[in-house]
């Protein structure tokens, strides 16, 4: 799982250097805009100072350069990249504006979503207005988010490790996929892709061992074209998928149409 930065229409993707070329408007008695380049630099400084390595960063400017959106992916593995299906990492999302429409904001997590249509989501979130203390508050936001990262990393790593160790029978795996379709987590337009991936997996890294992790990767592989075509919907769908996978560690899974809790074996598509 990675971060998602979505731009629209006249938005433009820029480098960190390009941000230094964007003029900052004059402030007022109550409004003190923080330069886009400063927002990026302060985020980068706080991460490096805390000992994190930035694997990549992406920046987008919107509304005639009045709005800034960015994502920084960190070299912080939550699930081992040498395991079948790859892994997941921590990311930080940033947004700010000169048009007084958006507060300075930061989100962090493994499912960070930053979009110029104002979608802004992550497991850790802070927002502050451009006030006299705006920059200082933003620094504190970044530092507060960073302080919480080790705890978040431990929690998410434990989640993915449990997915890797939790084995499923063929009946349970098929029942889980059926429940995800029934609940709408897997949309009807994606059913064929998931079934095709089930019959003929793109990757054979897992062999005959079926786990919650391998099932999650099977589904996300089938949905990868959607990530390119409908990035926003795919990001939200991935979050719902993660929540659904967590329920598998419990003995039951919810089926919306029946509005009851059924044990997984009773949802079997066929004999093993």
Image (cartoon, rainbow, N blue to C red):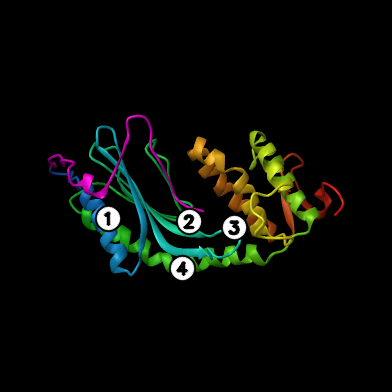
Regarding mark 3 in the picture, which secondary structure is present there? loop
Q: Residue at x 27, y 55 (%)?
A: 138
Q: Is residue 40 left or right of residue 186?
A: left
Closest to the observer, 247 or 53: 53
Give the labeled residue for mark 3. Answer: 85
Q: Nearer the viewer, mark 2 or mark 3?
A: 3
Residue 139 or residue 84, whichever sits in front: 84
Is there any visible trace of residue 134 in the rendered image?
Answer: no
Q: Secondary structure at mark 2?
A: loop
Dot 3 crowding, Cα within 10 Å, few <14, some 14–19, many 20+: many
Q: Which residue is mark 2?
A: 110
Residue 138, numbered label: 1
User: Which segment did they paint magenta?
Assistant: 1-28
- Please name the residue shown 77% across and 55% down the image: 172
From the image, state whether disc 4 or disc 2 is nearer to you: 2
Q: Earlier in the sequence, mark 3 or mark 1?
A: 3
Cα distance between the residues tagged 1 and 4? 21 Å
Q: Let me know if residue 77 is in the magenta part.
A: no
Residue sitting at x 64%, y 62%: 163
Q: Is residue 135 above or below residue 228?
A: below
Distance in Å between CA atoms under marks 3 and 1? 36 Å
Q: Which residue is mark 4?
A: 151
**x and y percentages locating residue 80 in the rendered image:** 54, 66
Left or right of 35 in this view: 228: right
């Amino acid at each position: 799982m990675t971060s998602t930065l979505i731009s629209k229409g006249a938005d433009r993707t820029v480098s960190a250097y390009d941000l230094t070329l964007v003029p900052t408007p004059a402030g007022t008695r109550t409004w003190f805009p923080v330069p886009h380049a400063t927002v990026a630099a302060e985020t980068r400084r706080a991460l490096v100072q805390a000992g994190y390595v930035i694997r990549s960063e992406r920046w987008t400017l919107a509304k005639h350069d009045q709005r800034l959106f960015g994502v920084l992916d960190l070299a912080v593995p939550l699930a081992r990249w040498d395991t079948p299906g790859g892994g997941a990492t921590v990311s930080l999302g940033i947004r700010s504006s000169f048009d007084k429409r958006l507060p300075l904001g930061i989100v962090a997590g493994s499912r960070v979503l930053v979009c110029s249509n104002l979608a802004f989501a992550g497991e850790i979130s802070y927002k502050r207005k451009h006030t006299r203390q705006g920059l200082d508050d933003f620094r504190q936001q970044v530092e507060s988010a960073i302080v919480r990262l080790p705890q978040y990393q431990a929690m998410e790593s434990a989640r993915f490790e449990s997915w890797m160790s939790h084995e499923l029978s063929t009946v349970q795996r098929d029942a889980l996929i059926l429940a995800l379709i029934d609940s709408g987590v897997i949309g009807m337009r994606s059913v064929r892709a998931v079934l095709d991936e089930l019959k003929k997996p793109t990757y054979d890294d897992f062999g005959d061992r079926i786990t919650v992790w391998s099932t999650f990767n099977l589904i996300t592989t089938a949905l990868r074209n959607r990530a390119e075509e409908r990035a926003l919907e795919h990001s939200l769908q991935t979050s719902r998928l993660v929540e659904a996978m967590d329920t598998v560690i419990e003995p039951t899974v919810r089926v919306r149409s029946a509005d009851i809790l059924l044990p997984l074996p009773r949802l079997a598509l066929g004999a093993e």
